[in-house]
Amino acid sequence: MDEYIVAADLYLRRGHSSGARDPEVEQLAKLTRRTTGSISRRLGNFQGTLHPGTGLKPVTGEALAVFRAMAADRQVRERLAAEARERLLAGLPPGVMQVPGSSVTRLVDTEQMRITETEVTLSEVTRIVVRAEAQLVTRYLAWLAKKGRDMSSVLLPSESGALRVDLFDPAQNLLIEAKAKSSREYIRYAIGQLMDYRRRISPPPSLAVLLPEAPARDMLELLSQLHISVIFESGSRFVDPTFT
């Protein structure tokens, strides 16, 4: 894991992968006792994680969870990289790692939260859904910015690592989950996520779902019964009952 951490640190500092002849790649190769080609491939893995289809096979599992946490918080990245370097220099084993964010709820900038589990799924359909959700969130944030309202994202602790919430308004204590479609299955999925998120925050927040269009009346009634607000896109604006 330490090899992944120091490689992730290099990738995140530069924002791109590097070839085997790069001086920093050579330094990491000596530090990790790996070949320069191995380190370069690790950087390509992270490129493929952030930008599917432009790099090598994305990272998964614990390496992905740690990479997400490092990408979301510079201080976490610097701390993990420093600790990993110390272990590598001393020839110590990686030991047991706790995914950052698994014990503390943290607000993070929305631009830092573009990495999700589904982004590394090899299904092209899944990738299209992820992009559609990200684009919807981007349009909504741009619309809010014109009205002087800011949003954050939030990392919540869980037994399996940090859970990412699409949007959080601290001023209103409001959680918003975005979905690429307004169909029944997508809305039911959003409901489950929001209910899980809410029980991890005190005081319990208000809930809302962000959709690309108004859902069917049956779904509106269901969300209303659960006291979940519905925000949806309509032309060049959003219908947003949470906006005051």
Image (spheres, grey):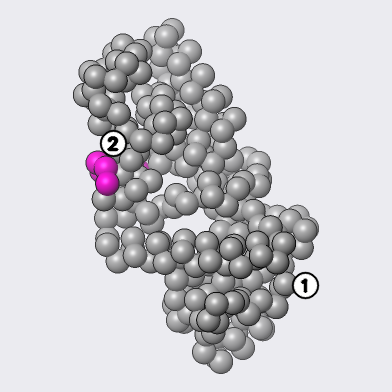
Kindly identify the residue that appears in the image at 59 percent across and 77 percent down.
237
Q: Is residue 57 magenta?
A: yes
Magenta part of the protein: which range?
Answer: 54-60
Mark 1 element type: loop
Q: Is residue 181 left or right of residue 122?
A: right
Q: Position of residue 4 (x, y in %)?
A: 37, 29
**Front residue (pair 193, 164):** 164
Kindly identify the residue that appears in the image at 76 percent across and 63 percent down.
172
Q: Which mark is residue 244?
A: 1
Mark 2 element type: helix
Mark 2–mark 1 contact, CB under 8 Å? no
The quarter holding residue 79 reads top right
Q: What is the crowding at mark 2: few (fewer than 14 residues within 10 Å), some, or many (at least 20)?
A: many
**Front residue (pair 180, 162):** 180
Q: Position of residue 185 (x, y in %)?
A: 44, 77
- Where the C terminus falls, by quadrant? bottom right
